[in-house]
Image (cartoon, rainbow, N blue to C red):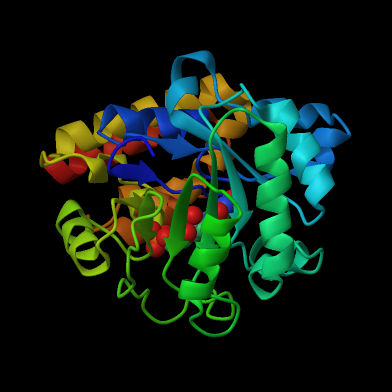
Amino acid sequence: MLGEIGLAPMAGVTNWSFRKLCFEYGAQFAFTEMISADSVVRNISINNKYFPRCEEKDKVAVQIFGSDPFIMAQAAKIVEGKGAWIDINAGCPVKKIVKRGAGSALLRDLKRLKQIIYEVKKNVNCKVSVKVRLGWEKNEFEKIYNAVVEAGADAIFVHGRTAKQMYSGKATWELKNEGYIPFYINGDINSLEIAKIAKEISGADGVLIGRGAIGSPWIFSKNQIGLVERLEIILRHIDLLYEEVGERAAVEFRKFVSGYTKNLRNAREFRVSVMKILDVEELKTTFTLYFEKLAA
Ligand SMILES: Cc1cc2nc3c(=O)[nH]c(=O)nc-3n(C[C@H](O)[C@H](O)[C@H](O)COP(=O)(O)O)c2cc1C
């Protein structure tokens, strides 16, 4: 919708601080973590932490999930204006979401998915996209694509696996871009070179990168990142996360450690030691000493 390469939505990962780093290294757009439409309608204050900040508002979509078309439409009205556009989650395979008829459960009830898109579109003035998978248990992308287009969505993002596959096997990029609405391919895209291949195979207008960006926000950049710059990014990430969540930053940063230390010497031992740290300054010092040792 906004360029050719975006950061995929990831609950617990794509918060403000991480989005900021990805933008700095070339991501052109991003999403919030998924937000429950029910909780938006009930006005639960915790949602405020998810909404985009002012400076990024024009390039971050607010992603909502739910199963009731009218609650989704109400939630969309409330979040309209908090981000660049609204994205509907029709791809999440997590049990507790699917049990409620939301996320990828919508892929086995296309009538409902269409109604959700239709009601949301009717209720807002901003663009509305949908993020899907190939299907529930088999590849039915053509049917899903047609349903999404017919219901009036403005763009589609597809993770090239079925819901049943979760994250197993390889994502397929062998899909056809019919070209009615902007079409983005996603799944297993771990570099700009691979992004180009996935785009060529699928004919997609652009790509989303998810897990490949965790602990590698520079994945969006053409430039090589050396050890000195890698440490700078890590320290900055910790500072930004601290600004966002306070002392919890030391614990929340743990999910990025594996990515940031990929292919480094003695990474395994280092990771074990870092996972115990509860203090942000100690975390920064520990990283600095580790990188000094690597450089020596
Ligand atoms: C930790 C994690 C959280 C995720 N949360 C969401 C989410 O909130 N909304 C969504 O649409 N997809 C979510 N996804 C799926 C990703 O957006 C993406 O489709 C998937 O990871 C495949 O792309 P990748 O191979 O580039 O990671 C999540 C994935 C991961 C790994």
Q: Is residue 296 visible?
A: no
The N terminus is located in which quarter? top left
Horizontal side of 227 relative to 246 (left or right) equals left
Q: Is residue 106 visible?
A: yes
Nearest the eye: 174 or 39: 174
Pinpoint residue 73: horizontal percent, then vertical percent. Answer: 76, 40
Pinpoint residue 222: horizontal percent, then vertical percent. Answer: 12, 41
Pinpoint residue 103: horizontal percent, then vertical percent. Answer: 67, 61
The C terminus is located in which quarter? top left
Horizontal side of 279 relative to 226 (left or right) equals right
Residue drawn at (72%, 52%) of the image: 116
Say above or below: 173 vs 31.
below
Nearest the eye: 88 or 125: 125
Residue drawn at (35%, 63%) of the image: 178
Residue drawn at (24%, 62%) of the image: 203
Residue furthest out toward the top: 54
Say above or below: 172 vs 61.
below
Horizontal side of 57 relative to 114 (left or right) equals left
Pinpoint residue 16: horizontal percent, then vertical percent. Answer: 51, 29
How many dots with numbers?
0
Q: Where on the picture, by quarter, is residue 228?
A: top left
Q: Where on the picture, by quarter, is residue 269?
A: bottom left
Nearest the eye: 110 or 199: 110
Horizontal side of 96 relative to 240 (left or right) equals right
Say above or below: 80 vs 190.
above
Residue furthest out toward the right: 42
Q: Where on the picture, by quarter, is residue 265?
A: bottom left
Residue furthest out toward the bottom: 138
Say above or below: 5 vs 236.
below
